[in-house]
Image (tube, rainbow, N blue to C red):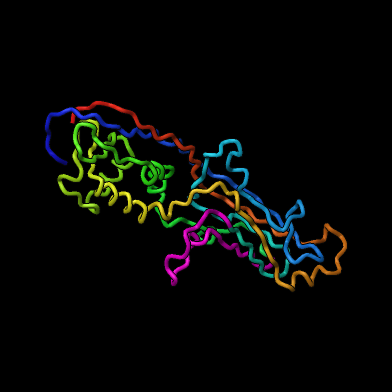
Amino acid sequence: MGGNFSSRKDVYVHHFVNPRIQERQEQVMVRMMAVPGENALLSLNGKREMNPFAHLISDKDEGQQAVIMGIYVLFINNETKHDLMMELSGLFNAGGLKNQDVQHIDDSGKLQILCPAGFNKSVEGNDRILYKPRLKDNVIRAYAGLDTALLKEQSITLNEKDDSESIVLEMAHPMVHFIITNTELLKPESSDVVKRERFLEIRPEFFNKARQYYADTIHNDMHVTRFEDTKLACAPPRDVLDDIQNKKDPSAMPNVTVMLQINYLIVTPGEPKMRHQEIKL
């Protein structure tokens, strides 16, 4: 990626502190009840909506976020005589429908859980899968929490000893990893990316090209969330409400119980830093 020459330049080197990533798996049981006079199932605390994932994110660390790697249904017990559809919405801020013919949860941030009439057993095989992201697991693990470094960081700086613009990144910077990993697709010219011992010098035009490619292929499907708007609700068919209309004993009211499993990453971001340094380029 370029030859060697000897000069010293006063530059600002952008140093990125990698976020702390913890991979977790959580199982959550949700239970809702049909109640006379209500047109929606109620949670145990009498609410029409509940948030099964609210406890997964620290309310003390405002910078902490999650990236979902999969949601599964492990067990269903539907005590009613009718099929029910639960809706889990607000999982993340979705980017909108990309393909009108093929809808994906990545485009809406919501999914549905079918609870068949009288079903009371574990869910097996592929029927367990409620949501898998478009992005592959290894891509999510590699780039979760790196949006600041790859998209938001102001990395273009001026060398003080000449009039040319340059971007100087340490080899450990996420953008360096992204460029090297995607060299065949980005097709840099020899002058676009020049390796200088512990640093990479990048032409601004190519840097912007790489940044846009990251946005189009990864960022738009990397859905970070704090589950603040997540809601689980169920509006049963009229037949369910008619069945319980004359029941008075709360213990006789039919329940729907679902065991969910969520696989996710907890992302605690690092802080991008910029330091002034005279280096030999």
- The single residue placed furthest to the top in the displayed view is 278
Identify the residue at image location x=52%, y=61%: 108
Q: Residue at x 68, y 68 (%)?
A: 117
Q: Is residue 81 above or below residue 222?
A: below
Q: Residue furthest front?
A: 163
Q: In the image, is residue 172 part of the stretch drawn in magenta?
A: no
Query: Is residue 99 part of the magenta span, yes or no?
Result: yes
Q: Mainly helix, strand or loop, the magenta region?
A: loop
Horizontal and vertical percent for residue 168?
26, 36
Look at 66% across and 67% down and name the residue there. 84
Quarter location, residue 119 = bottom right
Please tell me whether residue 140 is drawn above or below residue 88 in the rendered image. above
Drawn side of residue 30 relative to residue 62, left or right: right
Q: Specify whether 126 is left or right of 216.
A: right
- Asked whether, in this view, residue 79 is left or right of residue 260, the answer is right
| Residue at the far right in the pictured view | 248
Residue, x 55% and y 49% (percent of image)? 262
Residue 104 picture location, percent across and down: 47, 63
Q: Quadrant of the N terminus?
A: top left
8 to 85, vertically: above or below: above
> Front-most of 279 and 182?
279
In the picture, residue 204 is in which quadrant? top left
Q: Position of residue 29 (x, y in %)?
A: 65, 50
Residue range (magenta): 90-118
